[in-house]
Image: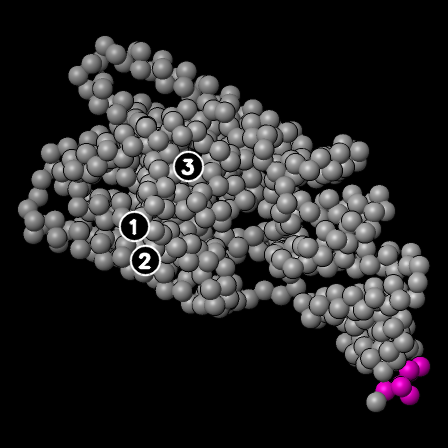
Amino acid sequence: MLKTKYQILFLAFIVLGLYYPALFSPSCSTDDSYMINNLLNMEDFSIRALFFPHGAGQYYRPLLYLSFVFDKYLWGLEESFMHLENVLLHLVNTLLVFAVTRQLLKLMRQEADNWLPLAAALIFAVHPINTEPVNWISGRTDLMAGTFVLTSLWLLLESLRSAKVLPAFLSGCALLLGCLCKEPALFFAPPALFLVLCYDRMEGLHQSIRARIVRGAAPVLFIVLGASAYLLMRSSALSSKDSGIAAVTKQIQAPPTDILNLARIVAKLTGFYLKKVFLPFPLNFGIVEVANLYVVPGVLFLLVLCWLLYRRSVSAFLVFSGFCICAPSFILAVSEMSWTPIAERYLYMPSACFAIWLVFQGSRLLKDRLTWAPVMVSALGLLLTGSAYATVSRGILWQDNAALFADTLKKSPNFGVARNDLGVALLKQGKKEEAYKIFKSGGVGNFQAASLNIAKVLIEEKDFGAAHKLLRERYKEHTRYHAKVLDMLVQVLEAQKANAKTPHESRVLNRELAEVICEQYQATGNPFYQYRLGLTHLSLDNRSSAYRCFSSAKAAAPATAHYRPAAIRLAQQFRKQAP
């Protein structure tokens, strides 16, 4: 068997080789572009505001956001470097799977230098289900959470093996850090507590109740403290409204009929994700529908899980961990909190548990059947080769947004988000006619981003009336695209004003324009909008209001602002009209 250092080098070679194409991928129009634009426009930064904003929201992932802030200041949000970070995180997690498997073997008093750790790490490294979080910049949330959860598990195993307090304390800290990257990390706490209860039964290792209490007290204490610390931090940070907790509470308080439907959905998704972890194909970035037939394997799996928990074995722990970490995604499916209700990225952390479980099961089969060894090794080789090919092919697909969303649309033809993003990708490639055809098709959906793209087409075709109507409908919805809605509404109103046929029509448009520009100023505090508002008040012959706006713009505008000289001149010109 290769020495440990050579195994680590081999794993690094495999991961970096498989995901090398990711370095040449652009940012994805789904989430990546919006996040990068926000970071580029971020003028100041506060650690305290990041961790304790005292606001509202459904996600609380300050450590993840902090990593993106570092990207801004370290290498200016260069896409290739951001992709490289994802690849390196996946490499770290692969090595952690290797280390956790060795630690499990030590706890079970088996030889840690056998082939199991390398096999588990290789299966995790090449598993095609992991291509989405690794190739997608925004998928870093799963990678970082996975790093800390696996670290927490390694430290927990070390604490149980050595009966030392420090690893237990660090395990709780790692769990907290994982939760600050993505919420499902919190759901590793129940399996961690289960491990403390069942570790003594692993492969005939039996201890007295007193010995188990002494050895397990510190791990239990620090795991509970880590989870509690996250909940307290989240409660403080989202003190105005926690939409995530509210969604969970709503499902718990649902009527009995809704509970039965929720149980059906949970069973169906369990069966679907179970199939995905064993057979991930077809890979799809936008899964929106799951066949009801998956209810059957889902129910069977849940029954088997109950039996495994009763047995209190290492297999029970691994299967229970994968299920618990995946379970929060069920809430997303029923509450529509995410742009896609079902996703392959939700299986990133569970796939690590699956890889370790699979090699342990293979080892158990070979225990008394050594003649099967050549067959098992050949099967593993074929599995790894096929998975590696699929992983590389998928990575190459991610290099082209148009190809990625065309593939997504082929597999989910009714997914409006994918159709809209395909149009965006084609537009960036200069294929204007194809993009506009997609936006006008009516199949892009009725959500904000798609509506804005439809409005762009209407503006391009000078159908300002239809664009105005659409934007006014979206104006009522205060989503993350509201600022863009205001910008486009100003553009449309200016165009309509230029084509106004009567003074009355022009006055009505100017009043609406003043309302929109005023909201832009209130939202941003940018003095340029005060200058624009002053010009609009002049069109309404409201000179006193115009003077106040010009004076405000003059006082607040930067010395180099292009509109400042005009604001100064107009403020002086209309000073006499001031009240």
Q: What stretch is highlighted in magenta?
A: 572-578
Q: What residue type is labelled 2?
A: Gly
Please indicate whether residue 22 sits to the left or right of residue 387 in the image.
Answer: right
Quadrant in which the N terminus is drawn: top left
Label annotation for residue 226: 2
Q: Residues within 10 Å of mark 3 (few under 14, many from 20)?
A: many
Relative to 451, residue 230 above or below: below
* Closer-to-camera residue (99/213): 213
Helix, strand or loop under label 1: helix
Q: Which one is earlier in the sequence, the residue at label 1 or at label 3?
A: 1
Q: Can residue 485 be seen in this view?
A: no
The residue indicated by pointer 3 is: 347
Q: Which mark is residue 189?
A: 1
Upstream in sequence: badge 2 or badge 3: 2
Residue 58 screen position, x and y as percent: 48, 56
Which of the pair 56/217 is nearer the observer?
A: 56
Tell me which residue sits at (85%, 74%) in the image. 537
Spatial distance from mark 2 to mark 3, Cα to Cα?
23 Å
| x and y, in percent, of residue 558 in the image | 79, 72
Mark 2 crowdedness (10 Å alpha carbons): few <14, some 14-19, many ≥20: many
Asked whether disc 2 touches disc 3, contact meaning CB atoms under 8 Å apart, the reply is: no
**Place of residue 363 in the rendered image (x, y in percent of width and height, measured from the top left):** 25, 23
Q: Quadrant of the C terminus?
A: bottom right
